Amino acid sequence: MKTLNDAINDKLLLSKQKLKQISKQKLNEIPFRKLAPNMVTMMALCSGVTSIRYAIADNWSKAVLCIFLAALFDGLDGRVARFLKASSKFGAELDSLSDFVSFGVAPAILIYQWSLFSLPRFGWLFCLIFAMGMAMRLARFNTMLDDEDVPEYWSHYFVGVPAPAAAALGIMPVLLCFDFGELEFVLRSHTFCAILMCLVTFLMTSRIPTLSLKKTKVKTSMFLPLMLIAVLFINFMLTQPSLTLGIMSFLYLLSIPFTALSFIKDKRKFEKGK
């Protein structure tokens, strides 16, 4: 007959074997809901890399389209992860790498091929500044995710210009040039593009608050007007996409000072309420 110790050892052995089987199953099988957000992120990354290919081939319209496709997929992957409850550290790291390529490297190469190549010696420097600025912006964003002491009023703002918006601002001259060809001598000049790249790099690496709509609440009385605006926006996107995106990028740039003023007001209200 087995002693009590033998019985306990047998049970421990069985439990260890079951744990090994479970761990092997976890390694060999991954739920599809865990893969779905990463697949969307990979689609964003592929769009960014494809933009580089079209930029090298001087196919400006497709290069711009791929960057905005990457922005679309970038906006979806986080929502898919939250909807499926499949957020992970791997997904967050993959998303940052995708953002760097799609919104840092791809716009820099596009602007270089489109304009800055004509600036001897220094043209590539401005593209490097933009790409490195994007890397620093994403690194700061990742470190801020672990910061739990962020005041409530910061929930309506980003710290600096977010990556997709920075990419849109960087390629804004290309968008506007599609519809305002008569201004090409200004929009395509290497001086204008170099200054713009430096300005956007400063904005995305700075601590200037910019608008975030993630937690913005809308009054019920504004529902119908906003639906009308959405319909108009979709109509213009379908009929004149480059002009619409170019004007929106320009208006976003103009909104930054007003957003900063709104932030100062919210900060003062928060400090008074303490």
Image (cartoon, helix red, strand yellow):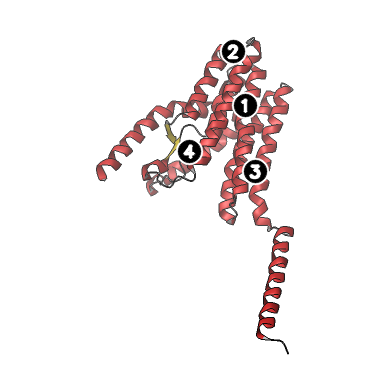
Say which residue label 2 marks.
190
Disc 2 residue crowd, few under 14, some 14–19, many 20+, Cα 10 Å: many
Instruction: First in sequence, mark 1 or 3: give its number.
Output: 3
- Residue 213: assigned label: none
Instruction: First in sequence, mark 4 or 3: give its number.
Output: 3
At mark 4, the secondary structure is: helix
Instruction: First in sequence, mark 4 or 2: give its number.
Output: 2
Residue type indicated by callout 2: His
Residue pictured at 68% horizontal, 82% vertical:
7
Say which residue label 4 marks.
229
Say which residue label 3 marks.
41
> Which quarter shows the N terminus?
bottom right
Residue pictured at 68% horizontal, 73% vertical:
15
Residue type indicated by callout 1: Pro
Instruction: First in sequence, mark 4 or 1: give its number.
Output: 1
Residue type indicated by callout 4: Ile
At mark 2, the secondary structure is: helix
At mark 1, the secondary structure is: helix
On the rendered structure, is 2 left or right of 126? right
Q: CA distance from mark 2 to mark 3?
A: 33 Å
Quick one: 121 or 20, which is closer to the camera?
20
Provide residue 220's location: percent of width, then percent of height.
39, 49
Quick one: 185 or 234, which is closer to the camera?
185
Label 4 or label 2, whichever lies nearer to me, is: 2
Disc 1 residue crowd, few under 14, some 14–19, many 20+, Cα 10 Å: many
Q: CA distance from mark 4 to mark 1?
A: 29 Å
Provide residue 4's location: percent of width, then percent of height.
66, 85
Residue type indicated by callout 3: Thr
Say which residue label 1 marks.
107
149 relative to 86, above or below:
above
Residue 64, picture quadrant:
top right
On the rendered structure, is 258 left or right of 273? right
